Image: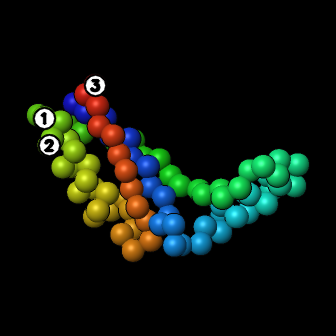
Amino acid sequence: MYQSIITITLRPSILDVQGKAVEHGIHTLGMTAVNNVRIGKSVQITVDAATEEEAKRITQEACQKLLANSVMEDFTYTVKKI
């Protein structure tokens, strides 16, 4: 068994409206040193695989086919044995 932790973020060229709203809120709280806020999502999955390589392949496929929008989002992941 392996656990994959996936981080999905908008590509840098895509305007992050939610990030801009959060950045504005942070500034109104007086924290003007905070800039370039980007919002993403984290997904954790358990993969029943015989090897780490197989778990990585399954994780990659899940990201490409379902979890991330390949037009607008990038993803990274880590896989560890549990």
Q: What residue is rendered at 39% in x and 68% in y?
A: 69
Look at the numbered disc 2 and give the secondary structure of its residue: helix
**Colouring mode (rainbow / by chain / secondary structure / one colour):** rainbow
Q: Is residue 17 left or right of residue 29?
A: left
- In-image side of 74 versus 55 (left or right): right
Apparent side of residue 49 relative to residue 35 in the rendered image (left or right): left
Instruction: Tell me the crowding category of disc 2: few under 14, some 14 to 19, or many 20 or more residues within 10 angstroms, Cα based.
Output: some
Quadrant of the drawing holding the C terminus: top left
Q: Quote the CA–CA distance across marks 2 and 3.
A: 14 Å
Residue ranking furthest to the left: 50
Indicate the secondary structure of the residue bearing disc 1: loop
Which residue is labeled 2 in the image?
54
Picture coordinates of residue 15 (x, y %)?
Answer: 59, 72
Which quadrant: the N terminus? top left
Residue 50: which quarter of the image? top left
Q: In the drawing, what numbered circle is on residue 51?
A: 1
Query: What amino acid is labelled 2 in the image?
Result: Glu
Q: Are marks 1 and 2 in contact (CB under 8 Å)?
A: yes
Q: Which mark is residue 59?
A: none
2 or 3: tag closer to the N-terminus: 2
